[in-house]
Amino acid sequence: MNSLLKRQIRKYFPAEFLNDERFENFFKAVEESYKTNNEQLSMIQLAMRISSDELFSANRKLKAEAESQKEIIDRLKSVMKTLDIKNIADKNQNDEYINVANLATYIEEQSKEITKINKDQEILLKNLEKKNQVLSDYAHMVSHDLKSPLRSINSLVTWMKQDYADKIDENGAKNLDIILQSVEKMDALISGILNYSTIDQEDLEYYKVDTNHLVNEIKQIIYCPKNVKIEILNELPVVKGDKFRLQQLFQNLIQNAVKSIDKPEGLVKIAVEENSNFFKYSIEDNGKGIKKDHFYKIFQIFEKIDNDFSSTGIGLSIVKKIIDFYGGKIWLESELSKGTIFYFTLPK
């Protein structure tokens, strides 16, 4: 036993405590702290012999280790408090002590249990990954199988309109157009469901995407009536993400804004504000607006707030899922007959 420890025991404890096997674990723990103290002293002495730059680095490391040790001690105190470990009084002594051996045994058992739980979680995670992959493959397969007959129907109806144009009356031509519109909606619905189901099943990729360039590309590919103008109010930033998901995000919001406009002169304004940890985008329109009761509903899959036949009810649910995927937030402000502003954040 450490000589200094022996002197402390002789000074502050009755002599019979030294050979009392009930205190054996306690004295061993205290002796270990002496060894730790000696090791730290040796480290300090070594640090004093190195250069000033190395000394600074070593001091930082020691500080981190000290903080880590303090955190461990605080956690142990919290555990002991949570476990409500009671002091056990010795029949022959007035002093009370904590049964360190029982505590060590309990912690060891809990550690084994945690290790077992972690292994079970790893197995469960692997099984979930396999199931997600199977579901993803199945979704792609079903998407392909469902779209094949749709393409056939589209081609057949188009040929009928061309080949029998002089034999089909106006009412028949309208019915064929309705069939084509239904086919297009079904195709969009299948694509939307596939996109929604696979957004968070693929690995998250991070690379630089210029959202200013991306939005200008979207302006060129979406349908925008002549009476609607899309303006970018300030330079949109470069963010980290992947272009496919970000294009889905912006395109769905811009298309919804354009479709909502019911005025002779429509305007969609896109802007951004920079904060310390994220970019806050806004997409504003002067359309018909949204009732406050529908603010939550519009982000639910297959939910629609109007009778637009072409709408699938998936677009905004995809937007919400993408933003959640990147760890951002989305909300809106709206006033009936005046317009709507969608706000969303993307981390830097």
Image (cartoon, grey):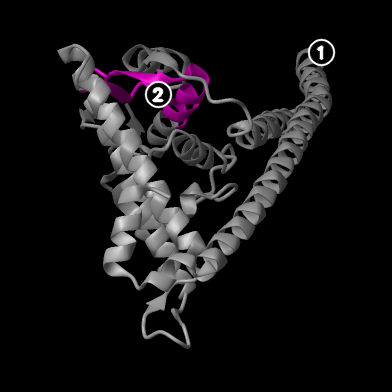
Kind of residue indicated by mark 2: Pro
Q: Is residue 177 left or right of residue 155?
A: left
Q: Secondary structure at mark 2?
A: loop
- Residue at figure coordinates x 60%, y 47% from the top left: 302
User: Which range is magenta?
Assistant: 226-252
Q: Is residue 73 left or right of residue 231?
A: right
Q: Position of residue 305 (x, y in %)?
A: 49, 52
Q: Position of residue 63 (x, y in %)?
A: 25, 35
Q: Nearer the viewer, mark 1 or mark 2?
A: 2
Q: Secondary structure at mark 1?
A: helix
Q: Determine if the magenta segment contains residue 236.
A: yes
| Relative depth, front residue between 224 and 213 | 213
Q: Position of residue 208 (x, y in %)?
A: 39, 13
The relative height of residue 302 versus residue 102 in the rendered view (above or below) is: above
- Quarter residue 287 falls in: top left
Q: Earlier in the sequence, mark 1 or mark 2?
A: 1
| Residue found at the very far bottom of the displayed protein | 91
- Residue at figure coordinates x 49%, y 70% from the top left: 20
- Quarter residue 46 falls in: top left
Q: Is residue 33 left or right of residue 108?
A: left
Tell me if I can see residue 47 in this picture.
yes
Q: Determine if the magenta segment contains residue 339.
A: no
Kind of residue indicated by mark 1: Asp
Q: Which residue is mark 1?
A: 163
- Residue at figure coordinates x 44%, y 79% from the top left: 87
| Residue found at the very far left of the displayed protein | 52
| Relative depth, front residue between 168 and 207 | 207
The disc placed on residue 225 is 2
